Image (tube, rainbow, N blue to C red):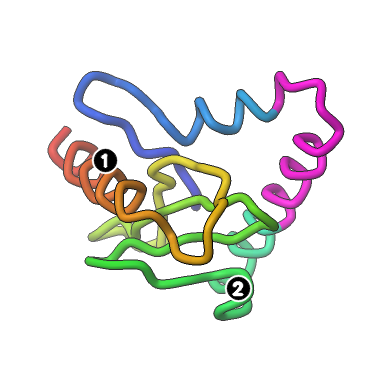
């Protein structure tokens, strides 16, 4: 199961990122959305993706799904029988390494989500 993590204020950054792509009129964003959906469907069906091309370990239990230049940080939900994951957000990657602020934000969202 793939879910979107929520902060204690109810903010859902992964949903916001995907909605922004959905509402965009740019053809590139439509392709990005299609790539995301393919990766999420494959991950939900198999529980894994090709490492390191489509899946990457970041830090402190945060991993990311890679779909072209889109990155979707996520974490495994503890104590679930279905092996659920929660997306903490999304961003367009513009550099070789994942920016530290995106990793720190994902860790913060996980902490907020698990506290609520």
Chief secondary structure of the magenta portion: helix
Where in the figure is residue 85, as x and y percent of width and height?
41, 55
Q: Residue furthest bottom?
A: 51
Query: Is 74 a magenta residue?
Result: no
The residues bearing labels 2 and 1 have C-alpha atoms spaced at a distance of 23 Å
3 relative to 60 in the view: left or right: right
Query: What's the magenta region?
Result: 22-38
102 relative to 111 in the view: left or right: right
Residues at badges 2 and 1 in contact (C-beta under 8 Å)?
no
Query: For the residue carrying disc 1, how many other residues have a C-alpha within 10 Å: few (<14), some (14-19), or many (20+)?
Result: many
Q: Secondary structure at mark 1?
A: helix
Q: Quadrant of residue 79?
A: bottom left
**Quarter of the rendering occupied by the C terminus:** top left
Where in the figure is residue 17, as x and y percent of width and height?
54, 31
Does residue 51 lie above or below 46 as drawn? Answer: below
Q: Which residue is mark 2?
A: 49
Q: Which residue is mark 1?
A: 109
Which residue is depicted at the point 81% across and 21% down? 25
81 relative to 49 in the view: left or right: left
Does residue 23 lie above or below 85 as drawn? Answer: above
Front residue (pair 20, 78): 20
Does residue 89 lie above or below 59 as drawn? Answer: above
């Amino acid at each position: 199961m793939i879910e979107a993590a929520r902060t204690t204020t109810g903010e859902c950054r992964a949903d916001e990122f995907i909605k922004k792509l959905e509402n965009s009129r740019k053809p590139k964003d439509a392709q990005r959305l299609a790539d995301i959906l393919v990766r999420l469907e494959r991950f939900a069906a198999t529980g894994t993706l090709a490492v390191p091309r489509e899946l990457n370990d970041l830090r402190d239990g945060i991993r990311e799904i890679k779909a072209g230049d889109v990155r979707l940080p996520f974490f495994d939900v503890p104590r679930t029988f279905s092996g659920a994951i929660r997306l903490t957000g999304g961003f367009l990657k513009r550099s070789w390494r994942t920016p530290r602020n995106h990793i720190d934000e994902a860790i913060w969202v996980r902490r907020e989500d698990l506290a609520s």
